[in-house]
Image (spheres, rainbow, N blue to C red):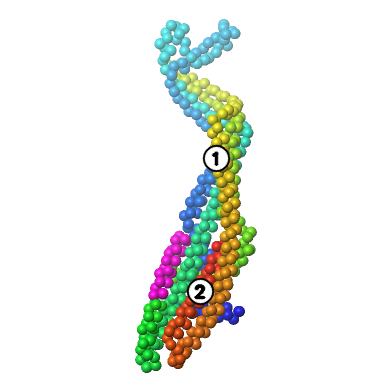
Amino acid sequence: MRERASVVAAMIVSWGLTSGAAAEVVLLKDLEQRALEHHSLLQAGAARERAAAATVREAESAYKPHIGLNLDSNVGPGRRIITIPDPAHPNDETKERYVQGVNAAQKGNWATALIPQWRSTAMLMLGTNLYDFGRTAAAVAATRAQHESSKVEQNVNRAQILGGVRAAYLTWLSAHELHRLSATASEDGVRRSERVVALVQEGARPRAELAPVEADRLLSELERERAEGDLDSSRLMVEQAVGVPLSTTAEPDLQVLDVQVAISQQDGQVDPALRMLVHQRAALQATARMHRKQGAPVLSASAAAGVGVLIYDEPAKALPSYSVGLAMSVPLWDGGGNKAAADAVEAQADELRLRLESTESERDHERKRASLDAEHALRRQHTAEQLLEVCSTRVSDVEAGYELGAMQFDQVQQARAQLRRAQTELVLARVAHAEAILRVAP
């Protein structure tokens, strides 16, 4: 078995000799890294993650006091500072009080009561929620859950990008190897045509064999041209998946076909799509709790201090002022809006629960299918290796017999066709085996 593998490996290496020594082998891991660095999908996901982080900070700001400066300037009547006696001590001028109002009515001149006066105030406001019975905590928990969900969504984006790069890379690798085989077959067809022409000119072979030989050469050339088109198309697929162009001398790495990681060893890997659904459901559940907490009371405190300036026909007067207070806000009924919003979000969470169960089942079947595909591809590879040995021996014997005149050209053509089929089947089997493993690789 080891001898057979060595022979097949030597044949595969010989196929690559036509590509030249200047080829640049591009590793799959390098393309994966470049795709993760340049892909716009990840950049958009990073923007969503920043937005979610900012939403968390916005919700957490409710724990902190709010400070503001209120500047106000207006004009209106009744702004004059007047002196009135103390009702308890009407004759004691030391206990007179200053109030804001008008005194025109005492003189019988009501028109002066409408004279406008300017008033400007500057107040520093401080307010904070002392206790809101879990309303802010629920909002912060919901935004944090959404932030975690956005992070996990980035992992799903990475997995999608890597899956696309791996699929495109294997398609490129398969097209590259099939192009090598077709190029080798085309060169062999040219050499056979030249050899048969020489034998016909020498009289060793009949002239009737020239037409079949030329047809065989043209068919080989047609296969090469088709394989070249497939190769160019697969290169474009890789460039699209990675997001950057490949060099003109780029070639895939054949060692990717030798990946031997057992699929059963990947059972412990957590699928990013499953984790995303779990976190999305948790975020919806937290959002539902936030909506239900919107009906909770809010106990708040406020403080304000500043100065007001009154301007009229007398010298301006500055009056300092301050206030401190507590407030309790108790929502009584909102028409059922918060409950309806919470019910809607909980229904979405139930939908994600069902999707999670369905996705888990799909991932399990996908892993089983990948395991079966890898097993069947490995069997195909072993059979193709045996067929390749037999066909290689058959081609050598038939061509030697043709040179001696003991074989006809159609026998050579048939043996060569079987050899190309064996080479093609070996490439396809190895690619299928690598694809099955990389399909579920972390």
Q: Quadrant of residue 264?
A: bottom right
* Residues at marks 1 and 2, CA–CA distance in whole angstroms: 55 Å
Q: Principal SS element in the magenta part?
A: helix
Q: Residue tagged by mark 2?
A: 425
Residue 357 x/y as whole percent: 59, 51
Residue 79 x/y as whole percent: 47, 17
Decide which of 301, 93 is in the foreground and name it.
301
The residue that appears at 48% across and 54% down in the rendered structure is 41
Q: Residues within 10 Å of mark 2 (few under 14, many from 20)?
A: many
Q: Amino acid at mark 1?
A: Ala
Up/down of 227 relative to 64, above or below: below
Decide which of 112, 243 is in the foreground and name it.
243
Q: Residue tagged by mark 1?
A: 344
Query: What secondary structure is found at the residue carrying circle 1?
Result: helix
Up/down of 41 relative to 16, above or below: above
Image quarter (top left, top right, bottom left or bottom right) of the C terminus: bottom right
Q: Amino acid at mark 2?
A: Glu
Q: Would residue 263 be seen by someone viewing this image from the given angle?
A: yes
Q: Write down the region rendered in magenta.
A: 222-245
